[in-house]
Image: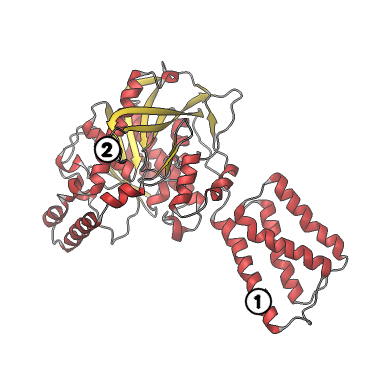
């Protein structure tokens, strides 16, 4: 929490206790001014946010008590119980809400480059399969993060309207509950010039039904090290996309309910039970072999792989990305992603020869991988999966690889440790981020990603295995 928020909450916590102890404050009008002054400082230097509303309500009550200083003698038992219970509930909320949903700080990028970003609208010739209109074509928003020359540009806001509204809608919250994110200060500037030099291009694909741009901690660090990152927002399958005309396209719940149906649920359930009951690797593989390509997730992975290829098509045409002219190395394109997007990165490595290397961050590798051997560098970064979660990935790569393959695990991490979620929601029981310190998880992950692409796109003589020596939570195995 912020400084004046803590002071305000301490005041509204301590003073009711003093009242219960029958402590009477001398010079009550003078003391009544103090909370008001602190609130004014909070308003000016920090700003209001809804998580503090219970604290604000108690502050009003404290000021009234200071001015009137009523006694308990004239109050009935029922009224006393009601007041004490209500105050206790509001006080708990006053502390819990701003702690669980804090005004957080993003890690400071450590690379030599400042960071800029622009939004690009891409229109493809691919049919839009998610909407009901047959004439619809797939359109994508892409956030381009790049090394920048900063002059007088402003820092951007944390998350755009589409990401915010969609995230709120996902959890049944009104859109205004995300307004407090205006207090978050990214290290990314709005539309500056590209820094001098040429840079490899990485295409990043987000997790399914997640905030497409909710990976500042990871991406800002990688861009600062000298990479251009094209952050795809997979329309209707992220929390939300906002287009240049102002239209916001949220996650398509209709498509999900029609396609991710009972049949798919039974398919996944039956395969999982057979997998758990299997007595050897052969029986495990037989249980899930068809699931890799027939499950609904496999269809989405292949669609997202086409999205990545469409972005590369537009990158090569240069019209949409003209500001990057003379700053990109077309022959050095990599792909990485998280969860569903990580599997899409693995899929496009198979499907598109222009992608030279890829990383899957904590995604089950649905799709074509099960029937293909790899001939390009690939890394699988996994969180610390619970024992009861079946590891289908041990069979997704059974065809092997003739190129370098890294199987990497980050101990004590959770599925959201690679997103900004652990900073947005600090309660580990809710954020699915494991026990690892979020900043350590970001640092370890970005180090792995940078080292991998430095080796295979920048052709540096790195040894990714050395990262094990830097982070005790990281274990790396070459080959699966």
Mark 1 surroundings within 10 Å by alpha-carbon count, few (fewer than 14), some (14 through 19), many (20 or more): few
Q: In the rendered view, would you say 320 is above or below 389?
A: above
Q: Depth check: give the residue in front, 89 or 364.
A: 89
Q: Quickly name the residue at label 1.
A: 82
The picture places residue 472, in percent across and down from the top left corner, at 39, 49
Seen in the image, is 261 located left or right of residue 320? Answer: left
Q: In the rendered view, would you say 268 is above or below 251?
A: below
Asked if the residue under mark 1 is in contact with the one under mark 2, i.e. CB atoms within 8 Å, the reply is: no
In percent of the image, x 18 and y 57: which residue is there?
271
Q: Secondary structure at mark 1?
A: helix
Residue 289: tell me if it is visible: yes
Q: In the rendered view, would you say 55 is above or below 290?
A: below
Residue 365: tell me if it is visible: no
Q: In the rendered view, would you say 76 is above or below 6?
A: below
Per the model, the C-alpha gap separating discs 2 and 1 is 57 Å
In percent of the image, x 26 and y 34: which residue is there?
348
Q: Quickly name the residue at label 2.
A: 303
Mark 2 surroundings within 10 Å by alpha-carbon count, few (fewer than 14), some (14 through 19), many (20 or more): some
Seen in the image, is 124 located left or right of residue 168? Answer: left
Q: Secondary structure at mark 2?
A: helix
The quadrant the C terminus occupies is top left
């Amino acid at each position: 929490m912020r400084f004046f928020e803590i002071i305000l909450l301490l005041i509204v916590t301590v003073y009711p206790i003093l009242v219960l102890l029958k402590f009477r404050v001398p010079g009550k009008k003078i003391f009544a001014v103090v909370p008001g002054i602190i609130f004014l400082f909070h308003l000016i230097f920090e700003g209001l946010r809804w998580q503090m509303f219970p604290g604000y309500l108690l502050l009003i009550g404290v000021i009234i008590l200071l001015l009137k200083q009523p006694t308990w003698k004239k109050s009935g038992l029922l009224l006393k119980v009601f007041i004490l219970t209500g105050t206790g509930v509001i006080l708990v909320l006053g502390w819990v809400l701003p702690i669980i949903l804090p005004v957080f700080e993003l890690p400071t990028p450590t690379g030599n480059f400042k960071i800029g970003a622009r939004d690009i609208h891409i229109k493809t010739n691919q049919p839009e399969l998610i909407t009901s209109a047959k004439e619809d074509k797939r359109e994508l928003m892409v956030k381009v993060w790049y090394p920048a020359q900063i002059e007088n540009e402003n820092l951007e806001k944390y998350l755009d309207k589409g990401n915010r509204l969609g995230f709120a809608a996902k959890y049944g919250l009104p859109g205004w509950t995300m307004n407090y994110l205006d207090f978050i200060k990214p290290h990314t500037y709005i539309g500056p010039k590209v820094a001098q030099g040429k840079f490899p291009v990485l295409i990043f694909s987000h997790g399914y039904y997640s905030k497409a741009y909710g990976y500042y901690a990871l991406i800002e660090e990688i861009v600062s090290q000298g990479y251009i990152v094209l952050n795809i927002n997979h329309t209707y399958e992220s929390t939300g996309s906002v287009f240049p005309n102002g239209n916001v396209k949220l996650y398509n719940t209709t498509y999900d309910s029609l396609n991710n149906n009972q049949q798919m649920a039974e398919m996944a359930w039956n395969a999982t039970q057979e997998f758990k009951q299997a007595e050897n690797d052969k029986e495990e593989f037989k249980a899930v072999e068809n699931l890799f390509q027939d499950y609904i997730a496999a269809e989405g992975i292949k669609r997202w792989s086409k999205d990545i290829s469409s972005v590369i098509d537009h990158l090569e045409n240069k019209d949409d990305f003209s500001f990057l002219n003379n700053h990109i190395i077309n022959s050095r394109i990599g792909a990485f992603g998280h969860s569903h997007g990580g599997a899409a990165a693995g899929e496009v490595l198979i499907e598109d020869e222009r992608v030279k290397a890829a990383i899957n961050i904590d995604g089950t590798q649905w799709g074509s991988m099960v029937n293909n051997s790899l001939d390009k560098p690939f890394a699988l970064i996994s969180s610390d999966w619970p024992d009861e979660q079946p590891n289908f990935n041990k069979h997704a790569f059974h065809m092997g690889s003739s190129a370098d393959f890294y199987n990497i695990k980050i101990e004590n991490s959770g599925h959201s440790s690679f997103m900004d979620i652990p900073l947005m929601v600090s309660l580990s029981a809710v954020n699915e981020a494991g026990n690892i310190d979020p900043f350590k998880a970001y640092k370890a992950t970005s180090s792995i990603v940078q080292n991998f692409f430095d080796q295979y796109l920048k052709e540096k003589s790195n040894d990714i295995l050395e990262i094990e020596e830097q982070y005790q939570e990281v274990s790396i195995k070459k080959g699966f």
